[in-house]
Image (cartoon, helix red, strand yellow):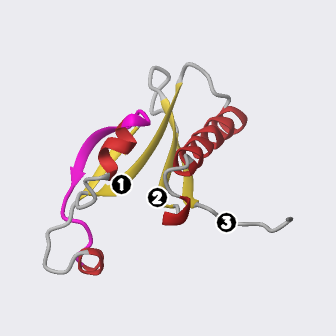
Amino acid sequence: NNETIVCGSLHLSLSYNAPSSLADYGEAIGHFSAVSVPSKYGKKGIGKMLVKAAEDYLLEWARKEHQLDSNLRVVMEMGVVDLRTDLFPWYQAQGYVIIKEISPIDPGFAILIAPNMNAKLILMQK
């Protein structure tokens, strides 16, 4: 069977912050969001593979575009809606740590995900 099946996806954006002085570090930042694995493909390691592929892509991009060296900090980050408490242990098991709470998030977004609830975005990094 040569059928192609999409069993997961994520969005990755890349940015670079130049150092402000010779003693400072530049930053290559990967920000991923919209990680999605349909439930019928869940618990098979697909999410972990997607996140790892995004991390590897960021490192390769930093190496090629910004001569990955000792003066370059490489950071992968994502925002997680605080209502999805089930996601935090999973991301922490992948090496991500909670950096800060971003509040309030766009009220229009909060209404879409949880009407009448005070949803916040939690920034996690690795």
Q: Is residue 88 left or right of residue 69?
A: left
**Residue at x 27% of width, y 80% of height:** 108
Question: For mark 1, what is the residue?
Answer: 79
Q: Quadrant of the N terminus?
A: bottom right
Q: Secondary structure at mark 1?
A: strand
Q: CA distance from mark 1 to mark 2?
A: 7 Å
Give the image quarter of residue 80. bottom left
> Do tag 3 and tag 2 residues touch (Cβ < 8 Å)?
no
User: Can you tell which of label 3 and label 1 is closer to the viewer?
Assistant: 3
Query: How far from the left and from the top, in percent, is residue 88?
Result: 31, 46
Question: For mark 3, what is the residue?
Answer: 6
Query: How far from the left and from the top, in percent, is residue 59?
Result: 62, 35
Callout 1 amino acid: Gly
Question: For mark 2, what is the residue?
Answer: 33
Inspect the magenta stretch and tell me whether residue 49 lies in it.
Answer: no
* Residue nearest the observer in this picture, 59 or 114: 114
Callout 3 amino acid: Val
> Reading the chain from its start, which is encountered first: label 1 or label 2?
2
In the image, the segment drawn in magenta is 93-107
Whether 17 is drawn above or below 20: the answer is: below
User: Can you tell which of label 3 and label 2 is closer to the viewer?
Assistant: 3
Query: How far from the left and from the top, in percent, is residue 82?
Result: 23, 57
> Reading the chain from its start, which is encountered first: label 3 or label 2?
3
